[in-house]
Amino acid sequence: MATTTIKLGLTKPEYTDEIEHTIQALAHNFQKLDDDSKTYVDAPPTSGVWPSKHILHANQLSIGGYLGWVNIRSGTAAPIWKSLNSYSNGAVIVPNKDNGHFYTCIQSGYSGLTEPIFPVSNGGEVQDTRGANQWNPNHYYSVNDISFPTTDNGRFYVCIQAGESGDVEPNWVIVDGATTYDKNAVWASYRIAKWRESGTAVLYRPFGKID
């Protein structure tokens, strides 16, 4: 009669077992060994759903580096938010500073220059236009200032040439990256991205620092 090992729970077939059962037991053993084998990576994952206590080992070791990473919170992995980056509907991100949540893009567009204050309430939404203000006439704008048209068109505009705005609001271009000339100032157009809180994010932490 087959028995099992103590640590991994592998099946130890007996010579009296039927061949079919022995083959199934060996297949189970191989899968168990594969599941329990070490995984080597260059960095923690940025996609997928991962359980807590999931351990990854570093491909490259160096003084001052770490042996690997361990996930201390079950959840979804996602890339870190980037400024002025194009995002499509369904794309997911996490804030640069962990807040325990991940976010799904619900309106394709571009992120702003400054990371938004992401909501932590279930299903909370945020528009990615932190630091933007409504356009004003005869106002001096610096490079990287962000403005909205006085009539919402679903876009924000980044100043790419400093200067004074005109006394009449310009006709805002609505093509991504295209420029609008506003007396001495020049603006680049971007469609606004929007985000929705979508659940718990993973949190991989390094372990085993190499001194």
Image: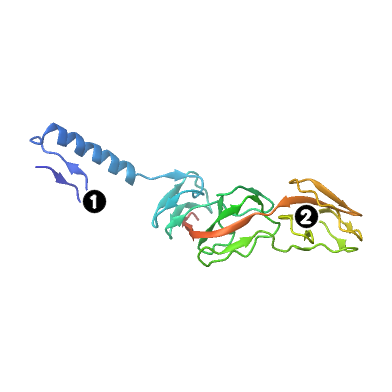
Q: Residue at x 82, y 62 (%)?
A: 135
Bin the neighbour count of mark 2 within 10 Å (Cα to Cα): few under 14, some 14-19, many 20 and up: many
Bin the neighbour count of mark 1 within 10 Å (Cα to Cα): few under 14, some 14-19, many 20 and up: few
Point out the tag, 1 or 2, that comes first from the N-terminus. Answer: 1
Above-or-below relation of 59 to 208: above
Q: Secondary structure at mark 1?
A: loop
Location of residue 73 (image quadrant): bottom left
Location of residue 11 (image quadrant): top left
Q: CA distance from mark 1 to mark 2?
A: 60 Å
Depth order, front residue of 150/99? 150
Q: Which mark is residue 158?
A: 2
Q: Residue at x 16, y 33 (%)?
A: 20
Query: In the figure, is residue 142 to the left or right of 42?
Result: right
Above-or-below relation of 17 to 53: above
Query: In the figure, is residue 143 to the left or right of 78?
Result: right
Q: Measuring from the top left, give residue 157's x and y in whole percent.
A: 77, 55
Q: Residue at x 57, y 66 (%)?
A: 119
Q: Measuring from the top left, give residue 128's x and y in whole percent.
A: 66, 58
Number of callouts: 2
Depth order, front residue of 68/44? 44
Q: Residue at x 15, y 36 (%)?
A: 21
Q: Secondary structure at mark 2?
A: strand
Depth order, front residue of 53/49? 49
Q: Of the residues tagged 1 and 2, which is closer to the observer? A: 2
Q: Measuring from the top left, give residue 53's x and y in whole percent.
A: 38, 57
Report the colour scheme. rainbow
Mark 1, residue position: 7
Callout 2 amino acid: Val
